[in-house]
Amino acid sequence: MALLQINDLIVLYGEIEALRGVSLSVDEGQVVTLLGANGAGKSTTLRAISGLAKPAAGEILFDGQSIAGFGPEAIVRLGISHVPEGRRIFPGLSVKENIMLGGSNRRAAKSELSREADAMFDLFPDIRPFSNALGWTLSGGQLQMVAVARGLMAKPRLLLLDEPSLGLAPVIVQAVFRIISEIRRNTTVLLVEQNARMGLSVADHGYVLETGRIVLGGKPDELWGNEAIAAAYLGGGHAKVTA
């Protein structure tokens, strides 16, 4: 059974169909990547899963349980953590305090959260020297690492990552994706990424979204073998993908 199963999902923004019958699945232990241009519906898919966008129709199953329409707090408690685009770090809190906030859903003692936050610096050594620095002093790459560490503090079974490479220098992108490769040892990941090459480099499976619909899905080598994918994501072309 898939850990996450989405069937015929429809999400409306006013009268606009942001998602038009999206279906996909994520097996436990996998990294699955959602690819597509801006406005394709990638972030909306994650928002629907995490309870930030209410589906108009369709089904979202997590570990066999229907969660469509659940609020964000209930979904976090079930084991889904969402790291949204834009990092959204609290600028007036320290790096460690920001990371500790990720465990607030677990009702753990502050001392326990402090120990776990310290352990996060083993996975994210680049931000260890900035443990006590305020969020506003960090670079974009450092903020992204803090955001992912904060998401992991919820001890999720499924981590939703929205555009982790956005706006980062290539060397920092490489570092972020090395961390994603480490995360997958213990956590299932659904990754939204415009950088198709990096997104598929860590993925077991990928889906391509166009204007709110899944138009193609498959293993990374199958997607790269599709001429339309190669034109759209590797050569700067604008070929329309057809399943």
Image (cartoon, rainbow, N blue to C red):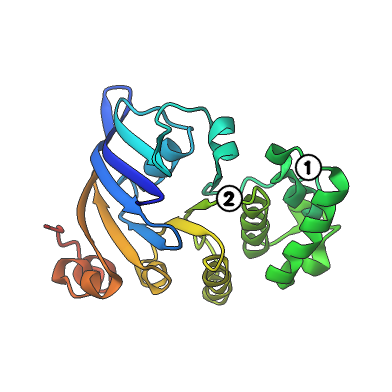
Q: Amino acid at mark 2?
A: Pro
Residue 186, image quadrant: bottom right
Tell me where residue 16 appears, x and y as whole percent.
27, 28
Image point (36%, 37%), residue name: 60
Which residue reaches farthest left?
242
Answer yes or no: do the residues labelled 1 and 2 have beta carbons within 8 Å? no
| Residue 56 found in image quarter | top left
Residue at 16% across, 66% down: 228
The x and y percentages for residue 49 are 43, 39
Q: Secondary structure at mark 2?
A: loop
Tell me the element at label 1. Answer: loop
Q: Would residue 94 be visible to someone looking at this image?
A: no
Tag 1: Cα neighbours inside 10 Å, few (<14), some, or many (≥20)? few
Using residue 3 as the reference point, say whether residue 59 is left or right of it. Answer: left
- Which residue was labeled with disc 1? 108
Residue 139 in sight = yes
For label 2, the residue is 156
134 up-or-down from 131: above or below: above
